Structures are given as structure tokens and as C-alpha cells.
Amino acid sequence: MNTHSIPTFVVVGHVNKGKSSVVATLLEDPSIPIDLVPGTTTEAAAYDFKIDGKSIFRLIDTPGFQEAEATLEQLQLRSKNAGDHQNAIRDFIKEFDGAGRFHDEVELLRPLLQPGPVGLLYVVDASRPYRATHEAEMEILRWVGRPGMALMNRIGEEDHAESWRPVLQQFFSVVRDFNAHEADAETRLRLLATFGELHEDWKAPLKAAVDSFSARTKQRATQSSDAMARFLVESWSHVEMMNFTPANSSAEGGKEAAKLSARYEKYLRKLESDARRTVESVYGFAPLDRLELNFNLTPEDLFDQEGWRLFGLSQAQLTARAAAAGGVAGGVLDLFTGGLSFGAGVALGSVVGAAGVWFGSQRVAKQWTPEHTRFARLFPGQHGHVRAFGPIANDAFAWVLLDRALVHLRVVQHRAHARQGPLNLEDTAGFRVSDMSADQRKVVDHVLRDCQGAGKQRQAPHPEVVQNLARCLKAFAQGD
Ligand SMILES: Nc1nc2c(ncn2[C@@H]2O[C@H](COP(=O)(O)OP(=O)(O)O)[C@@H](O)[C@H]2O)c(=O)[nH]1
Ligand SMILES: [Mg+2]
């Protein structure tokens, strides 16, 4: 197929009803401009979906109707009967092209009359009630004589689909709900397949597009599980070290040890942040802003309900915790089976601090002197005293890192590409460590032991360890 004969869908509708959002979400392309101010899209723009560089179908984003009723009047002046509707539109375009008035209508109508296979997608905002003024838009689109589908988007919270549906059905052979900012991968692919139903010849190319999107989704699952597994294995086995002079006073020594643990924490934060960026880019997003809560917990905060709430604990869980005061370390298991965890939107620095406070901490660096029998093997090339911090000794904290990664993956995976604004990591239903099967948890537990073992030997964990974890995470993420 040359590019003039690929199925082309012109996205039309009133200004500011989500046309550009539909294009961005369907093509999984966050770079498509979404209007913050109505009427920012002033020219029609074509976006091709390609496989191996070859265009398969095209979406054309348009500015949208501004003056539908006046346009329809102009068309009626130029037409005697249904036989000359398209000519009337051509005359209209010719007369007003470059004239200023009806600029947006001209931009919208021109691609609809181009030769070749053209369909139209009429986008409405069904969170607002149907009003008769929209009828002029639909009447104009009827004059165009192209196969068309109506998409009921929802910009606001209300639902007025029932006032729209009977009207839309008079003008369009297919009417579908499609929330441009909420639609997940499955809904998007179902809609694309429906585009193929608009014309016999479009079925095959749209099926090829759907297959290609599905293959990409699978590939993304593999790449993101790999990235998560590499991050976890590295953070679970990491050891931060620093030389020190034993002649230091104990106060000074304490300060230096604190510096080492701060360095450890910083390194983990960087690993997590890099892994999140990788997952975001695998899913086609530029680095996303995240709403992150930052706070420092002290032992006194342990009974501060606000602190617990920030980590997503309910009132009942708070009460249970308070009753078990002092038994926090013993409650480690509940933390996961009970679905309690650390909000993925809480800055990791805060979590490291809290883990130390809540779980009884390994936050004391080990000190090594050259006299230790294993010193030469563990710290080759070192001659003085060494402080080492890590690998993770606190299992609960290790699981918290996994839990946060799962939540982040889930939110990114489900984000429509038209969505603006930061990632909301508090939005976390059903994709937590506590949702893993016993077998999956067993795999994770083995991997964690391997990482701790390797870290203690100051060796990199075996690549197979990463692969095992990646396979397990992928199966979990895909619901197998
Ligand atoms: N919450 C929400 N907002 C939407 C949705 N679709 C569009 N918007 C918002 O509505 C405004 C107009 O969207 P846009 O796609 O630019 O509309 P267009 O002018 O028809 O291309 C933007 O601020 C979007 O963020 C939706 O499905 N949900
Ligand atoms: Mg737009």
C-alpha cells in the first residue's frame, strides 16, 4: 500500500472535547500536544502508525468545530439536494481557504474530502449533556459521506451518555465509549480493531496494527521486568564501603559511620530512580514527575498516626499496631500478608529511615581491620581499616523495595499516553507483594538470600539470579 491508500481516520468534534487526547492515547504517543487552552490545535496534523518503517494506518488530528451552525448555513446556500453535498463542501473550502473566517472548519473538512480510504471519528464529551447545537456538526459530517464512528469521551465526572447515544446512533454506524485518559491497553486495542470494521478493506491493516501493539506490550513487559529485577538484585546485594582511621574519637567515628549509611541510602535512591525512569521509557514516556512525600521519622513518630497513614495504613491497622507496641519487628510477616506496605509515593529516603526505626535496624556499619581472616579476600587491595554497610539485612525493607517497584510498574503500565501531570503512586489497587502467590514469594525469597549471600562475599550475584527474579516478576505482572 502506498501512503495514499492506507486507512485514514480524521478525528473531528467540537474544540476541546479530547480529540488530541484520543490520538495520543491510541498511538501511545505522549508527544502529541493536548490543549490546556481551548483552540491551541490550529492546523490539521497527520500521525502514522508504522510497522518496520511502513505506514499502516493514519490518524489526522484537527482543530475542531468552532462555528458549526454558520458553516452549515453556508453549505446549505451552496447545495440544492443530497447529490451535491460534497461539491458544496468543496466550494466552501475553496472560498474560505486562507480567508481567516471558518479557518478551523476548513482545516477539519479538507482531509475528509481527500481521495482514498477515509473514515471519521467524531469525539464528544459525554460528561456534559447533549445539546442541539451539536446537531449542526453531525449534519455537516453526514454531508461528507464517509464511514464514521462516534466516541463518547469523559472529561468530567458526570455521565450523560444516555442523552447522547440515541442522537449519535442516527448519524454514525458505530458508537463507542472511550475515555481518552483512562483507557487501558486492552480497551485501546479493542477500539482499533473496531476501526477495521468501518470498511471491508481496512480489516487486515487494522488487525496487523493490533497484533503489532500486542507484541509491543509483551516486549515491554519483558523489558520492564528485567529492569526491575536488575534493580532489586543490585540493591539487595549492594555494599557501601569506606576507609577509616581507627585513631578517630568515637564521636567522630559515629559521624563517619552516619556518612556511610547516608551514602548507602543515596545509592539505593539512585538505583530506584533509575529503574523507574527505565520502566517509564520502556512504556514510551519521557521521565515523569512523581508526587513524592518526604519526611523523617524518629522513634517518637512511631506512635504518630499521621506517619502510619502516609504509608497507607488504615485506622484498624493502626490500632492493631499500637496494641502490639514494641512488637514491631515481630510483625514483619503481617506487613505483607496483611497488605500493609510503604506507599510507593513516599520518597525512598524516608522509607530507609522508617525501616530503621520500625524494624530494628542494621543501620550500624560493620568495621573490618586487616587482621580479620577474610579481610584480604573481601577487600582486595585495601590495607587500612574499612567500614562496610550492606548487603540488606532487613528482609522487610527488601520486600518494601519490591512492593514499591510493583506499584510503580502498575501505574506506568496503565497510564494512557494522553495523561498530563505527575504519576499518582497512591493509586495502587491489587498489585502488591501481598497479591503474589506463595510460589512466587518463595522465588523472591530465594533470590533475596542469594543476593545477601553474594553481597556478604562482596561478589556480584550470578546472572541467573536476575533471570529467575525477572521471570517471576513478569509472570506476576501478566497475571499468570
Ligand atoms: N479527565 C479527562 N480529561 C480529558 C479527557 N480528554 C481530554 N481531557 C482534557 O480536556 C482538554 C482538551 O483535550 P484535548 O485532547 O486537547 O481536546 P481537543 O481540543 O478536542 O483536541 C485537555 O485539558 C485534556 O487534558 C479525559 O478523558 N479525561
Ligand atoms: Mg486538539
Image: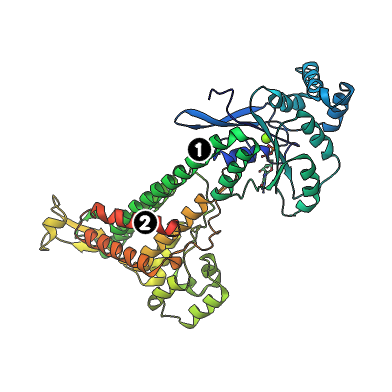
Q: Which residue is nearer to you in this view: 358 or 114? A: 114
Q: Secondary structure at mark 1?
A: helix
Q: Specify whether 448 is left or right of 332.
A: left
Image location of residue 13, percent across then percent down:
74, 37
Image location of residue 312, percent across then percent down:
53, 66
Q: Residue at x 44, y 56 (%)?
A: 477
> At label 1, which amino acid type do we have?
Ala
Q: Is mark 1 within 8 Å of ligand 1?
A: no
Q: Secondary structure at mark 2?
A: helix
> Residue at label 2?
265
Image location of residue 317, percent across then percent down:
52, 76
Does 184 appear above or below 77? below
**Pair 1/2: label in front:** 1
Q: Please report contact status of discs 1 and 2: CB closer than 8 Å, yes or no.
A: no
| The image quarter in which residue 466 lies | bottom left
Residue 223 appearing in the image: yes
Query: What's the mark number on residue 78?
Result: none
- Label 1 environment density (alpha carbons within 10 Å; few <14, some 14–19, many ≥20): some
Q: Residue at x 80, y 35 (%)?
A: 137
User: Which mark is first along the chain, 2 or 1?
Assistant: 1
Image location of residue 236, percent across then percent down:
31, 59
Does 179 appear above or below 48? below
- Label 2 environment density (alpha carbons within 10 Å; few <14, some 14–19, many ≥20): many
Q: Residue at x 56, y 43 (%)?
A: 417
Q: Quadrant of the C terminus?
A: bottom left
> Residue at label 1?
208
> Looking at the image, what colour scheme do you see?
rainbow
Task: Check the image and name the residue furthest to the bottom.
Answer: 323
